[in-house]
């Protein structure tokens, strides 16, 4: 490379979204010598993967993959991480973007040792969104036990600030700054990778499937939190109405997916997620029965097919070909009966279970709030990569519904696209 080219190649990259895709793009670009700014709106990195109990198909906890990435980030001086941060404005063109970033206050500084004394002193409780409101935490909180950065944060929507000040009083490390204010910073970068990910489809919009109406109908992401050792029930899968250990669990596949009234597309991961969650229940309750109502099971590729076949061999797992059409609750037992219709034969199946899990799909975060940049979207709100125009790219679930492996592959590709933008300037 000529000296001139090398100088051009030292331009920087902005990655928006610190989920598994954003982390991958950041690390791949930084580890070959590029400066990367990583902007994450949450107070922690890792995205939705941090809420999972285990990853399919290996069934290892997400911390195995994430911790290595966090270490690589810590060790790399070319990476600049901003949490509680959002992009406010993007001006310019490929190779030369001026970006304005808003840094929201954490109200807790780097002195924090995560000792927990502030939490004991805090008198304000809030719904714990990380656990889909299945438990409560305090106005000052650590998002979850393995959060990176390992620092507390205050929720300003419920905290009464200096008026209360109890957390600041007990903090021995001078870590709490209740007067902290939002800041704005400006960056000049050559390329931007949007890795803004997904949100669970709002199950309460699916009128016929009883979410929000019957306590014992939960979503697949709630199941991840119930099964997680750091979740609201410390990993015990208990049905919400009475904390009973369920003797039967029914999974409703394509809950709101492949449905013109909700999400017309397949989210790619829901079949695998339910098969995986069947193992969570079977592991804990050896006699429990699992029913999976499906239109067709999508377990793409060799490894996923193998995983599916293994679960199918379990004599307590029953696969029912039928699209769930309606649900009802027995008011005494609080059990749920699902009526599913075989779309080919028209046959109706009634199946009762103590708990129902709706396998809801993924919605791009960009559907509800579009980034302030000139991007193209498909009809479902996912960002379309315009490689001809270049400069800005979408990685992982910002681009399409994907599992972790495909998100990582796609994010690695987008790191290369971002680097090519800088080199070709
Ligand atoms: C029930 C369920 C179970 C699953 N289980 C598995 C599994 O076992 N194995 C597997 O491979 N996959 C699984 N998946 C899929 C997996 O969750 C996704 O592949 C993964 O989350 C994709 O990562 P991502 O970084 O693209 O998106 P996300 O995880 O959504 O991360 C996006 C990040 O961007 C941030 N962000 C969003 N908007 C902005 C903004 N404007 N500014 C700054 N930051 C922003 C978000 O806060 C978030 O941190 C499962 C999915 C579901 C629904």
Image (cartoon, grey):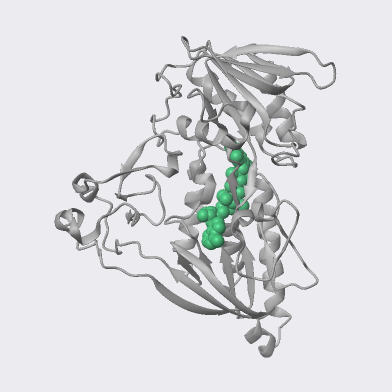
Question: Which one is in front, 319 or 258?
Answer: 258
Residue lying at the far right of the rendered structure: 344
- Pick the quarter of the image with the N terminus: bottom right
Give the answer, above or below, for where 92 lies relative to 58.
Answer: below
Give the answer, above or below, for where 94 lies relative to 236.
Answer: below
Q: Position of residue 80 (x, y in %)?
A: 47, 70
- Residue drawn at point x = 69 percent, y = 86 percent: 5
Q: Position of residue 51 (x, y in %)?
A: 49, 42
- Pick the quarter of the image with the C terminus: bottom right
Total numbered circles: 0
Residue lying at the far bottom of the rendered structure: 4
Q: Position of residue 109 (x, y in %)?
A: 29, 64
Relative horizontal placement of residue 165, taking residue 347 as reference (left or right): left
User: What is the quadrant of residue 417 in the picture?
Assistant: bottom right
Residue 195 at least partly seen: yes
Question: Which one is in front, 58 or 45?
Answer: 45
Question: Which one is in front, 41 or 173?
Answer: 41
- Residue drawn at point x = 47 percent, y = 35 percent: 225
Relative horizontal placement of residue 138, taking residue 202 as reference (left or right): left
Give the answer, above or below, for where 103 lies relative to 298.
Answer: below
Q: Position of residue 42 (x, y in %)?
A: 46, 56
- Residue drawn at point x = 50 percent, y = 61 percent: 40
User: What is the quadrant of residue 29 in the picture?
Assistant: bottom right
Relative horizontal placement of residue 121, taking residue 92 as reference (left or right): left
Question: Which one is in front, 276 or 423?
Answer: 276
Residue 275 at least partly seen: no
- Residue drawn at point x = 67 percent, y = 11 percent: 350
User: What is the quadrant of residue 30 in the picture?
Assistant: bottom right
Give the answer, above or below, for where 236 lies relative to 1.
Answer: above
């Amino acid at each position: 490379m000529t000296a001139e080219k090398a100088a051009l190649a030292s331009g920087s990259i902005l990655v928006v979204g610190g989920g598994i895709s954003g982390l991958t793009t950041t690390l791949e670009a930084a580890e070959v010598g590029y400066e990367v700014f990583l902007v994450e709106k949450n107070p922690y990195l890792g995205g939705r993967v941090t809420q999972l109990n285990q990853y399919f198909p290996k069934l290892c906890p997400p911390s195995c993959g994430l911790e290595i990435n966090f270490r690589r980030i810590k060790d790399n001086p070319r990476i600049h991480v901003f949490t509680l941060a959002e992009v406010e404005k993007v001006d310019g063109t490929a190779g030369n973007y001026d970006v304005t970033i808003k840094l929201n206050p954490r109200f807790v500084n780097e002195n924090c040792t995560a000792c927990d004394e502030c939490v004991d002193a805090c008198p304000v409780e809030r719904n714990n969104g990380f656990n889909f409101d299945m438990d409560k935490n305090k106005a000052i909180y650590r998002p979850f036990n393995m959060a990176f950065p390992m620092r507390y944060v205050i929720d300003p929507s419920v905290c009464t600030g200096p008026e209360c000040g109890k957390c600041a009083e007990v903090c021995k490390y001078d870590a709490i700054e209740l007067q902290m204010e939002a800041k704005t910073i400006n960056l000049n970068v050559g390329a931007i990778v949007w890795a803004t990910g997904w949100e669970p489809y709002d199950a309460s919009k699916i009128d016929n499937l009883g979410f929000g109406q019957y306590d014992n109908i939960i979503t697949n992401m709630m199941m991840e939190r119930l099964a997680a050792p750091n979740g609201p029930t410390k990993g015990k899968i208990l049905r919400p109405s009475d904390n009973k250990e369920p003797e039967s669990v029914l999974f409703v596949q394509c809950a709101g997916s492949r449905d013109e009234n909700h999400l017309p597309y397949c989210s790619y991961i829901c079949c695998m997620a339910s098969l995986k969650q069947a193992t969570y229940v079977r592991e804990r309750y050896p006699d429990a029965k699992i029913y999976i109502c499906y239109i067709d099971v999508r377990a793409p590729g060799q490894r996923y097919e193998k995983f599916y076949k293994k679960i199918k061999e379990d004599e307590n797992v029953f696969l029912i070909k039928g699209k769930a059409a309606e649900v009802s609750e027995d008011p005494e037992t609080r059990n749920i009966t699902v009526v599913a219709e075989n779309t080919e034969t028209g046959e109706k199946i009634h199946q009762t279970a103590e708990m129902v899990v709706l396998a809801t799909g993924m919605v791009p975060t960009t559907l509800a709030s579009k980034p302030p940049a000139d991007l193209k979207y498909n009809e479902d709100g996912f960002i379309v990569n315009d490689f001809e125009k270049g400069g800005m790219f979408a990685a992982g679930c910002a681009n399409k519904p994907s599992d972790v492996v495909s998100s990582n592959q796609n994010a690695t590709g987008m790191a290369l696209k971002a680097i090519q933008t800088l080199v070709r300037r």
